[in-house]
Amino acid sequence: MARLIVLAGFFFAFGFALVPLYDTFCEAVGFNGKTLKDALAAKDAPPSAINYSRKLGVQFTATLMPGLPWEIRPLEPAIELHPGELRTTRFLVRNLSDQTIVGQAVPSVSPTVAARHFRKLDCFCFTQQTLAPGESREMALTFIIDGDIGDEISELTLAYAFFLAPKDPA
C-alpha cells in the first residue's frame, strides 16, 4: 500500500512539472513555434547578414479562440523577403463587444524547424493587449529570419492564436 501511495505521489509531481518542462524544452529547441528565448537573445546579438541570393515567402495568419469577441487580420497576409532582412508588418485588431477586453496572442511558426531562425524583435505577443469597446488598433511585429536558414526552407508561416486573457483574481 505504501508503494502505491509513493508511486501515485511521484506521478502527481511528474504531471504537475510536465507543463513548465515542456515549455522550457520548446523554447530551447524552437519546437512548436516558441521563439521568445531567441527573440530576447536577438536584441543583444549582432544583425545577421542579408542573403540577397534567395527569397523566402512568409504567410501570416490569426485565429480567435472561443470567448474572444475580436476581429483580427494581418494587413499583409503574405510577404517575400531576403533572409537576414529586418521587416515590420502589422495586424489590425478590433474589439466587437461593448466591454473592455484583454487578450493574449500566442505565436507558432511552421515548419517547426524554421522557428529557431525566426527572431521576433518587437511583437504584440510579448504582452497582453487591452482594447476598449469598439476600439481598433494596428499591432506591429518586427522580425528577422536568420540569413543562415537552411536552403530546404523556402516558405514559412507565422500563426497567432488569440485567447481571452484570464481575469485577475484580485
Image (tube, helix red, strand yellow):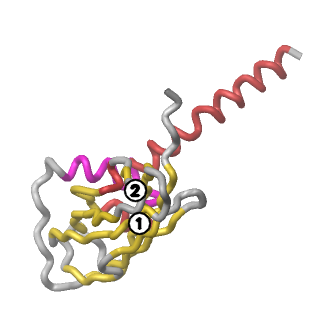
Residue 60 pos. (x, y %):
37, 74
Please tell me which of labels 1 and 2 falls first in the chain: 2
Which residue was labeled with disc 1?
109
Neighbourhood count class around disc 1 (C-alpha, 10 Å): few under 14, some 14–19, many 20 upward:
many
Which residue was labeled with disc 2?
30
Residue 118 pos. (x, y %):
30, 64
* Secondary structure state at the residue bearing disc 2: loop
* Secondary structure state at the residue bearing disc 1: strand
Task: Name the amino acid type tagged 2.
Answer: Gly
Reply yes or no: does residue 35 show up in magenta.
Answer: yes
The one of 1 and 20 positioned closer to us in this rendering: 20
Task: Name the amino acid type tagged 1.
Answer: Val
Evaluate if marks 1 and 2 touch, with contact meaning CB atoms under 8 Å apart.
yes
Q: Is residue 112 above or below residue 40?
A: below
Which stretch appears magenta? 28-42
Residue at the far right: name it.
1
Distance from the alpha carbon under mark 1 to that under mark 2? 9 Å
Is residue 152 visible in the rendered image? The answer is no
Reply yes or no: does residue 105 show up in magenta.
Answer: no
